[in-house]
Amino acid sequence: MADVGKQERERVDRERLRAIRFLRGGPVRLRDSTQSGRVLLESDERGTVSLSVSVLEGLKKEGLVTSGQGGCVEVTAAGLAFGRRAAAASDPFRAQHWDLERQVVAQGDEAQKITVNLAESPLAGLARHRTRKGEMFLGPAEVGAGERLRSDYTRGQIMPRLGANWITSVTAGKRSAGKGGAVELTEAALAARQRVDRALDAVGPELAGILVDICCFLKGMEQVERERGWPARSAKIVLKTALGVLARHYNPPGERPAGRPAAILHWGDEDYRPRMP
């Protein structure tokens, strides 16, 4: 009997975690199931998941999911944290504050796969928003451009130091914050700074400030609007414009994106046919 009870608890835990993972993609519709005691969580993009009514009610009582308008079900912030703790291989309470995702970021002419903490970047939350037409507010190119700028900004060591420089040796006499000159930088950091300079010059002074504030300093939209005296919900419109210009700087029209192989070209007449060996 003890084994039966243990198996039932494990089944319920798996079902709870599967429901949380499914709801992470956004609100879903709640539908009746042909099976007694079960319901369906339905999404046009992600398919359908069958769930026990008792499990769903338990998730609602614990505040992990909530019912929205029109019979929709969505996960709460507590539910997202629960899902991260359950999926973490180690240190679950630190993992609950993470939202990790594998992304491809261009570094120069090459593409590199990196792990990004979406909970750290204001762009990640804004990228989940949709327009009235159901389209994503920020496209992949715009989000990628913002993350690429933040990566170069971090690599270039441009963030202001908040304390003394304990890295430099005492005998060098450079224990203070220093001037931040190019002589003290590595080649990689200097190249990253140069890429940031070119990117900000390309977008212009009118749009460079909001890119630095949000993509690099990780300020929130409301904070930017308050500091600049802008109307409410206006920062995201300006940011989208700036990210569009930045994306065109990184991938100009007509040029192939980084990491994509060049197309094979040849010269020939209209009726040209290659000879097969």
Image (spheres, helix red, strand yellow):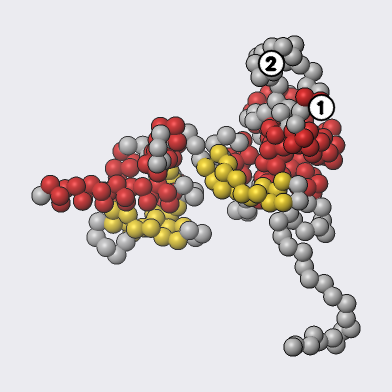
Residue at 85% over, 87% down = 271
Q: Nearer the viewer, mark 2 or mark 1?
A: 2
Which amino acid type is shown beneath numbered disc 1?
A: Ala
Where does the image place residue 59, in percent across and percent down from the top left?
33, 42
Q: Residues within 10 Å of mark 1 (few under 14, many from 20)?
A: few
CA–CA distance between discs 2 and 1? 18 Å
Where disc 2 sits, the SS reads loop
Q: Which mark is residue 169?
A: 2
Corner quadrant of residue 89: top left
Relative vertical location of residue 19 with respect to residue 201 in this rendering, above or below: below
Location of mark 1 (residue): 182
Relative vertical location of residue 207 with respect to residue 110 in this rendering, above or below: above
Corner quadrant of residue 95: top left
Can residue 221 be seen at all in this image of the molecule?
yes
Which amino acid type is shown beneath numbered disc 2?
A: Ser
Where does the image place residue 34, in percent across and percent down from the top left?
29, 65
Residue at 24% over, 60% down = 36
Circles 2 and 1, Cβ within 8 Å, touching? The answer is no
